[in-house]
């Protein structure tokens, strides 16, 4: 169905009509000039993130449902990264002409799945047109008791540096998807060349055979057997909210906390900058999944670079007082990778051979070459 | 200066380093995973709006400073439209490669001017790249005491329908800007044709003369004398926050309230739909500025259509109990344009000749033809 047949208000109504708000802090959701929330004695946390087609996602390998799920998870990850509980989501979409109502249905299905997982209410947004690609902005609102909030700025000298899960997997998933995309487009190009040649030769028999071949190419299914974990990490990231509960139950209150969106190095440098300290992390302690390592080798890429700068892991990075060492040890899926130092000692990785390498931060490329 | 020379973090730092937060509700602004707010016994209001280049703005006639001012005003207007006080702003930008650091400086200058006018803190956002045009998302957060909030849904039969300022001016400003843009591009095309002809004839003298002419064309200054008000309404809209103070001081509590972004007809239909009622408004009572009327005549356009469907006025539309008639009368700049009826009576405009016309709502065109 064409979006213009529904119009702005018809589309918004279709996408939001079955949304039920469940949080007590949501007084009024979709349907007025602004949403109304009530947080009383808790602090309100707000974070906004923009996702541009071609820069942050490529619709040749992520479908609209996964995309909806991913942008919701990525944005709520920012609230967890303050040790808060995400509660509400606001969704803005700029839609190119090629999008159909069904695409939006899928996008919202993914969005709602992510929100249901963490009991989050979709409370509003904006739906408009775009001359070109798809633009998405998600604002996530959450809450925390004042004393529970963990900033990037609280790390102290001798604190232990900890990280959840494993790193570099989402980045290697991206490499796999990019490779398959290249293979697919090569096949299409080769096919088109064959057709042109047959047309030039007026070879009707060959053209008939090529027409049958077409369906096979269109039905291209990339082979990711044995790499499912990497693809999942790229297409369906999970915010690490449960870790905060584990830490609370273990009586651990991190001194600083951030989520790893642009790679471990960038996240760690943010903490060190805001906390006015330095750090040492050990290459050998960086948690890496077996599939990540195997795929790095296959691609002839540096594994540590993938983990340090790969991005999109959405694991949590935090620091704890050194006295919490044993408590942390007992929690599965958390790895101690190094320690905080005085600021003048800089931010370094200690390689397996004992050499030290300065960590380099990098954000999203602001001007990406086309 | 090229943005890539600064990088994401350098750019954000440059744009936000002089921002001082002033609201007591702003606990922590720019610089962490999320902003931290505290609203205690007040309700939190949140509204998000997306602006896409080519759809919502055209950089051939709005400069970056006006654009920054406008997107801030438009979004905070949504908070006023709940009878709330805007307090914080979150800014997301998707930037095409052609933008320079200086463009962003200007954009932030406009943004800050609008925020200073209403004591609003810029508390965060996202800055990223775009493959194509400029994408902007603004989230505005505000507050109101629970009983002060005015929804779209509170209008009752016999309520008076009131509107602030005048309507249709921003739309006619847009017509003027569009016309001048056409004139400009015609001049450029004619000039290019002359150059081509001279080149074909190898007429060096003529080419020399054309080189001098070039500066004149590049210095094209559209003539808006006598139309300044319309241009201002289009390029520098003002949110009508002061009207809420006037109403409070006069002891008037509107039963419903909305801002007029997509034209009077759409706003009124939103109120009627949410309040389950109908309405009658009088064509003769719709407030229109002299410049709007004169320009409509010049363009041979229907004045009432411009006021009903023109959009971008950002005036406030509200309803009050009929008993407030005299109180409203005493407030300058507010016009009573009609009354609320039972739902089954529909939503109609009563023309000057007594005929009734059904009001039609229209949103932003979701799929705009290029």
Image: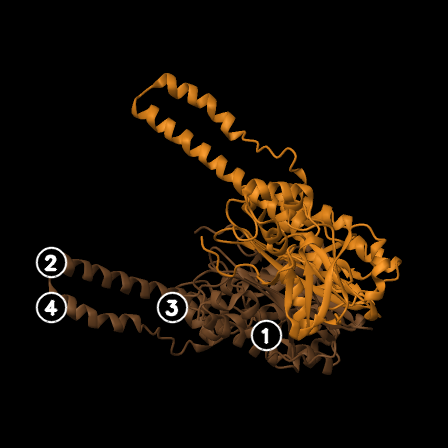
Chain colours: A brown, B orange
Calculate the distance from the C-alpha at mark 4 to the C-alpha at mark 3.
Answer: 41 Å
Q: Are marks 1 and 3 in contact (CB under 8 Å)?
A: no
Calculate the distance from the C-alpha at mark 2 to the C-alpha at mark 4.
Answer: 11 Å
Q: Does B174 sit left or right of A339 as displayed?
A: left
Res. A80 visible in picture: no
Q: Earlier in the sequence, mark 1 or mark 4?
A: 1
Per the rendering, the mark at residue A201 is 2
Q: Nearer the viewer, mark 4 or mark 3?
A: 4
Calculate the distance from the C-alpha at mark 1 to the C-alpha at mark 3.
Answer: 45 Å
Q: Does A105 sit left or right of B318 as displayed?
A: left
Per the rendering, the mark at residue A16 is 1
Q: Does B123 sit left or right of B207 as displayed?
A: right
Mark 1 lies on a secondary structure that is: helix
Q: Earlier in the sequence, mark 1 or mark 3?
A: 1
Same subunit: marks 1 and 4: yes
Q: Earlier in the sequence, mark 4 or mark 3?
A: 4
Calculate the distance from the C-alpha at mark 2 to the C-alpha at mark 3.
Answer: 41 Å
The quarter of the rendered structure image containing the N terminus of chain B is: top right
Q: Nearer the viewer, mark 1 or mark 4?
A: 1
Same subunit: marks 2 and 4: yes
* Mark 2 closeness class: few <14, some 14–19, many ≥20 residues within 10 Å: few
Q: Which residue is mark 3?
A: A298
Same subunit: marks 1 and 2: yes
Give A199 or A315, whichever is nearer the viewer. Answer: A199
Res. B275 visible in picture: yes
Q: Nearer the viewer, mark 1 or mark 3?
A: 1
Report the chain holding disc 2: A
Q: Earlier in the sequence, mark 1 or mark 2?
A: 1
Per the rendering, the mark at residue A205 is 4
């Amino acid at each position: 169905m064409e979006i213009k047949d529904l119009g702005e208000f018809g589309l918004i109504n279709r996408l939001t009509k079955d949304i039920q708000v469940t949080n007590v802090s949501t007084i009024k959701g979709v349907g007025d000039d602004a949403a109304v929330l009530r947080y009383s004695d808790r602090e309100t946390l707000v974070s906004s993130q923009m996702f541009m087609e071609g820069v942050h996602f490529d619709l040749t390998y992520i479908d609209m449902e996964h995309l909806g799920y991913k942008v919701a998870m990525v944005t709520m990850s920012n609230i967890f990264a303050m040790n808060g509980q995400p509660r509400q989501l606001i969704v803005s979409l700029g839609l190119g002409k090629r999008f159909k109502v069904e695409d939006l249905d899928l996008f919202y299905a993914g969005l709602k799945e992510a929100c249901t997982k963490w009991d989050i209410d979709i409370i509003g947004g904006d739906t408009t047109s775009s001359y070109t690609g798809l633009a998405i902005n998600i604002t996530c609102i959450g809450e925390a008791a004042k004393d529970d909030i963990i900033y990037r700025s609280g790390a102290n000298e001798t604190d232990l540096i900890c990280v959840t899960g494993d790193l570099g997997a989402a980045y290697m998933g991206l490499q796999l998807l990019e490779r398959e995309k290249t293979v697919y487009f090569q096949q299409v190009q080769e096919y088109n060349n064959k057709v042109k040649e047959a047309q030039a030769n007026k070879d009707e028999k060959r053209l008939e055979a090529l027409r049958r071949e077409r369906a096979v190419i269109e039905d291209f299914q990339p082979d990711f057997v044995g790499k499912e974990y990497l693809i999942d990490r790229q297409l369906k990231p999970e915010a690490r909210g449960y870790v905060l509960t584990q830490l609370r139950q273990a009586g651990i209150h991190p001194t600083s906390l951030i989520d790893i969106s642009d790679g471990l190095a960038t996240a760690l440098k943010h903490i060190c900058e805001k906390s006015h300290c330095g750090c040492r992390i050990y290459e050998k302690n960086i948690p890496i999944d077996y599939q990540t390592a195997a795929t790095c080798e296959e691609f002839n890429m540096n594994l540590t670079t993938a983990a340090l700068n790969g991005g999109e892991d959405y694991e949590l990075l935090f620091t704890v007082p050194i006295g919490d060492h044993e408590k942390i040890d007992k929690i599965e899926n958390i790895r101690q990778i190094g320690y905080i130092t005085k600021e003048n000692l800089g931010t370094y990785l200690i390689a397996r051979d004992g050499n030290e390498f300065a960590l380099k931060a990098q954000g999203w490329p602001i001007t990406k070459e086309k």
